[in-house]
């Protein structure tokens, strides 16, 4: 894939906030190197005179001046500035467009409703591999709904002024005025049944964080979080609307900046689920800004997850990974893990190499658990993290790890242990330099469920206490299970 390794900046003039995000490259493995927002609530004009005041524009220019100063070393072609619902609605938006062009030499792109919805849907493909259902982008000034089957099969269904800034200006989240306003706007969109709903936007992410808190979920990663719609809404409503009032003390523990917005987000989501007969909700931390990045990538990868894996791996050569993968797959110990996760583990087998030996296992586990991998399901995240834990440990030596071992089946846990030890054996056979030696070695199970390592020539290669321990560890795994 051709990559633009220059930084790429997106300035998002939204209805709730103005945000600068700088990516380190134009690629699927792009890391966010800077992310800052300034809350301005520009969307309040949607329900008023629909024009930005002189003070609003002056304040916005001050914010943009700082953002452009931060981004001044980035090529102008790699700086995108766009405005969504608030800018789109403003009667005097052309004044703002001209002023930004005059002061900073960059043209503000005012997104149409359709453009905003489709870009948000494209951004979803940064975090999820398979998308099939209804995508909803809930922001400060509007709600866009898009039907998606595949990357190249998206249908814009409609947009409405159902932003949280707008709703807050109308009344209480559980009041009749807000409820009727939502119903009138959703009625304009054709009713269809969708099994899956993909929730985009910070306000929906805040709901996911509420649910994680309720469920005591240890991993606060958004993009692979999925829930049953009915159970999700019921559990959150019971906590948020406590005895007819909003439980503000609880919400402030989750997010001080969004505690006022969360109840409106729940009401919107509840009505979407009811109208479109949603069964499952999938959350994501990507959206319109990643959609713009997506559009600028010259070639699309079939599995962007591996772009990130390779980026943090200590293995530089794909051909070496293939040798490792083929070798561990040849083991006849019936490892019940998908090839995608096995291959990723091969790439990441030395992830803790430079960490103190006593801390490698925990470092490897947590690096996988908390790294913002794209296109990685939550279950696979658990499996991959456990494989790397057992790469550096022959057993569970840290009590907290049982939190994650309980997330997988006994058979999968056994496979994680075995694969981890196989990668340890690879490390000692090759010295991290000579992967050709794997062709000379064959590891297999004997009839008595013991592990045997045989070599065609150069028998001195197996004269290693570390190798013997790895072989014994695998034998004990099968023996104890």
Image (cartoon, rainbow, N blue to C red):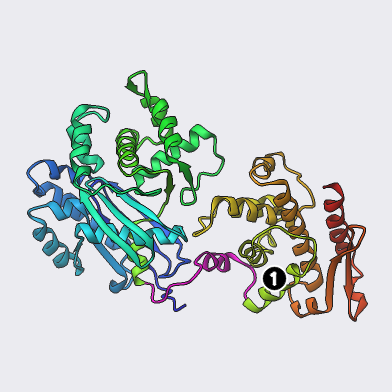
- Picture quadrant where residue 441 is located: bottom right
Looking at the rendered structure, the number of numbered marks drawn on it comes to 1
236 relative to 322, above or below: above
| Mark 1 residue element | helix
- Picture quadrant where residue 253 is located: top left
Instruction: Give the prevailing secondary structure in the magenta stretch.
Output: loop
Left or right, residue 454 beside residue 35: right
Q: Position of residue 58 (x, y in %)?
A: 14, 52
Left or right, residue 3 beside residue 407: left
Q: Residue at x 19, y 55 (%)?
A: 61
Q: Where is residue 151 in the image (x, y as percent from the top left)?
A: 38, 65
Q: Which residue is drawn at 62% across and 74% down?
A: 316
Q: Tell me if I can see residue 447 in this picture.
A: yes
Q: Position of residue 293 (x, y in %)?
A: 36, 66
Q: Which of 63 and 451 is in front in this view?
A: 451
Q: Residue at x 33, y 38 (%)?
A: 274
Q: Which of 251 and 413 is in front in this view?
A: 413
Can you identify the residue that label 1 sits on?
325
Q: Tell me if I can see residue 21 in this picture.
A: no
Q: Find out whether residue 315 is within the magenta segment.
A: yes
Q: Give the range drawn in magenta.
A: 297-316
164 relative to 97, above or below: above
263 relative to 104, above or below: above
Q: Where is residue 201 in the image (x, y as percent from the top left)?
A: 34, 48
Q: Residues within 10 Å of mark 1 (few under 14, many from 20)?
A: some
Q: Find out whether residue 368 is within the magenta segment.
A: no
Left or right, residue 264 beside residue 440: left
Q: Which of 428 and 341 is in front in this view?
A: 341
């Amino acid at each position: 894939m051709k990559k633009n390794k220059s930084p790429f900046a997106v300035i998002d003039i939204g209805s709730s906030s103005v945000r600068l995000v700088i990516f380190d490259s134009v690629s699927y493995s792009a890391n966010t190197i800077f992310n800052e927002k300034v809350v301005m609530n520009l969307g309040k004009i949607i329900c008023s005179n629909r024009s930005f005041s002189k003070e609003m524009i002056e304040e916005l220019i001050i914010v943009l001046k700082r953002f452009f100063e931060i981004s001044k070393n980035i090529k102008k072609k790699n700086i995108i500035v766009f405005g969504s619902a608030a800018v789109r609605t403003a009667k005097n938006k052309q004044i703002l467009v001209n002023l930004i062009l005059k002061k900073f030499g960059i043209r503000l792109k005012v997104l149409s409703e359709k453009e905003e919805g489709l870009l948000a849907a494209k951004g979803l493909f940064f975090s999820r591999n398979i998308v099939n259902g209804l995508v909803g982008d809930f922001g400060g000034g509007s709600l866009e709904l898009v039907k998606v089957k595949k990357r190249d099969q998206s249908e814009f269904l409609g947009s409405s002024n159902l932003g949280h800034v707008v709703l807050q200006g109308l009344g209480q989240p559980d009041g009749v005025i807000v409820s009727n306003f939502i119903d009138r706007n959703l009625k304009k969109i054709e009713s269809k049944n969708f099994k899956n709903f993909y929730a985009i936007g910070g306000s929906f992410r805040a709901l996911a964080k509420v649910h994680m808190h309720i469920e005591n979920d240890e991993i606060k990663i958004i993009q692979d979080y999925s829930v049953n719609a009915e159970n999700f809404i019921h559990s959150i409503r019971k906590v948020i609307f406590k005895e007819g009032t909003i439980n503000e003390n609880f919400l402030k523990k989750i997010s001080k900046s969004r505690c006022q917005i969360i109840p409106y987000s729940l009401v919107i989501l509840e009505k979407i689920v009811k109208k479109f007969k949603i069964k499952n909700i999938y959350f994501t931390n990507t959206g319109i800004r990643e959609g713009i990045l997506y559009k600028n990538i010259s070639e699309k990868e079939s599995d962007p997850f591996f772009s990130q894996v390779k980026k943090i791996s200590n293995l530089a050569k794909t051909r070496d990974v293939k040798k490792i993968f083929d070798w561990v797959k040849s083991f006849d110990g019936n490892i019940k893990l998908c090839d995608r996760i096995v291959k990723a583990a091969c790439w990441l087998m030395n992830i803790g190499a430079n960490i103190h030996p006593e801390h490698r296992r925990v470092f490897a586990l947590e690096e996988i658990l908390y790294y913002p991998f794209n296109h990685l399901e939550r279950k696979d995240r658990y499996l991959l993290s456990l494989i790397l834990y057992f790469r550096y440990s022959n057993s569970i030596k840290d009590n907290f790890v049982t939190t994650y071992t309980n997330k997988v089946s006994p058979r999968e846990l056994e496979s994680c242990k075995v694969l981890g030890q196989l990668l340890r054996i690879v490390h000692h056979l090759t010295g991290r330099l000579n992967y050709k030696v794997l062709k000379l070695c064959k590891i297999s199970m004997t009839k008595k469920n013991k592990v045997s390592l045989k070599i065609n020539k150069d028998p001195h290669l197996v004269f290693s206490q570390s190798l013997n321990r790895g072989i014994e560890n695998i034998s004990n795994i099968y023996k104890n299970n």
